[in-house]
Image: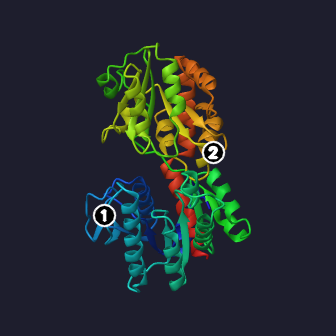
Amino acid sequence: MRFTGLSSCVALLIWRSELGRMKFLLINQYYLPDTAPTGRYLHDLAKALLLRGHEVCVLCSRRAYNGDAVYSAEETIEGVRVQRVRATGFGRKSGLGKIFDYASFYGALALKLFNRSLQFDIVLALTTPPHVGLLARWGAHRRGVAHAHWIMDIYPDVLAAHGKVSESSFPFRQLAKLTRRELRGSPLIVTLGEDMVGRIRRRVADLPEVCRAVESLPLWSEPELRPWTEATPPPFRIEQRWGERDVVLMYSGNMGRGHRFGEFLAAAEALNGDASLRWVFAGGGKRRGEIEDALARDSRLNVLLLPYAPAGRLREHLCSADVHLVSLDAKWQGCMVPSKVQGIFAVGKPIIFVGGSENSIAQWIADSGGGWVVPENDLPALLRAIEASRDPEERRRRGAAARAFAEKAFSRELNLNRLCEWLELRCSAD
């Protein structure tokens, strides 16, 4: 339901008063002040629900994403009541430690949901840890209320994409049954892109009520991310001594298992004689070692390896590049939708994307005209895209198209309003 104009605003106020104040319970393992991105997006939603007159409580872990901090058991952040449960804090250093963190959070969360003093009308679960939606569904059923799901990663499909299990294996089939069970009976399942919608609907094709509940809603960019309009280049570009005639090709952000770097490194090697091309990889993750290994093999490679963007300087960091590099292995299509495109488009920069064609990133680039889509293992096509990106006018045109697309598709205000309306309408009527 959407309301525009003065008369519609009056209608909205009447409708909300009839709907009544609802109590939302939001569940995710990590939340502010933790740096995990899922917690920041969940906080945006919590604040939006508060502004619409609802009560909001968040259940999360006391331990930080990387395990190095312990947060208070209860506090209020910008009006949002946050309750944290005890869990282990081994962090992300080992798979076994991560499993212990998950298991301890499951146990503490179950005890918290069992406590009748925790009152809520609607429960919304994210997907950290995997299958936490099962507990959300159980807690909702005990109270006779609706359970909704905001899916950031699809399990067990992520495990199959990573090669941990085979889709034909017994463990995969059993985990897939858990996914079906946690989603069953939900009036609202929100994903990050149409490719994720398609994957979930295939998983629950025999459950038409679940298929109807699945929606696509992209994550949003931060309002402060906008094109660089100042007369001088961004300070970050000046600090790196990248000249006006340099073409900076930058990969920025998480270098996770679902991304590809072989094609970019092959192109950097093929064009290594061109000093005007600056290859920059800024960030960290499981696959950062591939860039480190390439530099170890050939120290003359024109590649600069940097840490994540400095805190508080993301805008100038993104604006310092002429073209951004993004990738997604085809095996991961529909399992997740990396959120780096939102920030890049918001600052008006074009993208060279390497990956499959049946995913949200490729579709956004095709729909917007904000970059180039290059198939996997196609070095000639990548070299052609790089050659086209040398033209400043072409970069400006595609960057402007990217920014225009971001204002419509990745607007925080528009997408949050849409998500809130879905929760209010579908879950209250359940």
Where is 365 relative to 196, above or below? Answer: above
Residue 51 drawn at (x, y percent):
43, 63
Query: Measured from the top left, where is residue 334 in percent x and y?
Result: 61, 51
Q: Is residue 173 above or below residue 279?
A: below
User: Who is closer to the viewer here, 428 or 3?
Assistant: 428
Q: How is the image coloured?
A: rainbow
| Quadrant including the C terminus | bottom right
Residue 89 — which label? 1
Give the Cα separation between the discs numbered 2 and 1: 34 Å
Q: Is residue 21 left or right of residue 300?
A: right
Reading the image, the residue beneath label 2 is 359
Q: Nearer the viewer, residue 181 or 269?
A: 269
Image coords of residue 172 (percent x, y): 60, 64
Q: Amino acid at mark 2?
A: Asn
**Which residue is painted at 65% across and 36% down in the image?**
366
Helix, strand or loop under label 2: loop
| Percent of width and height locating residue 67 | 30, 59
Q: How many marks?
A: 2
Q: Amino acid at mark 1?
A: Gly
Please rate how many residues cluster around mark 2, counting C-alpha atoms within 10 Å: few if below 14, some from 14 to 19, many from 20: many
Work out whether residue 34 can be spotted.
yes
Q: Above or below — where is 290 with respect to 187?
A: above
Tag 1 secondary structure? loop
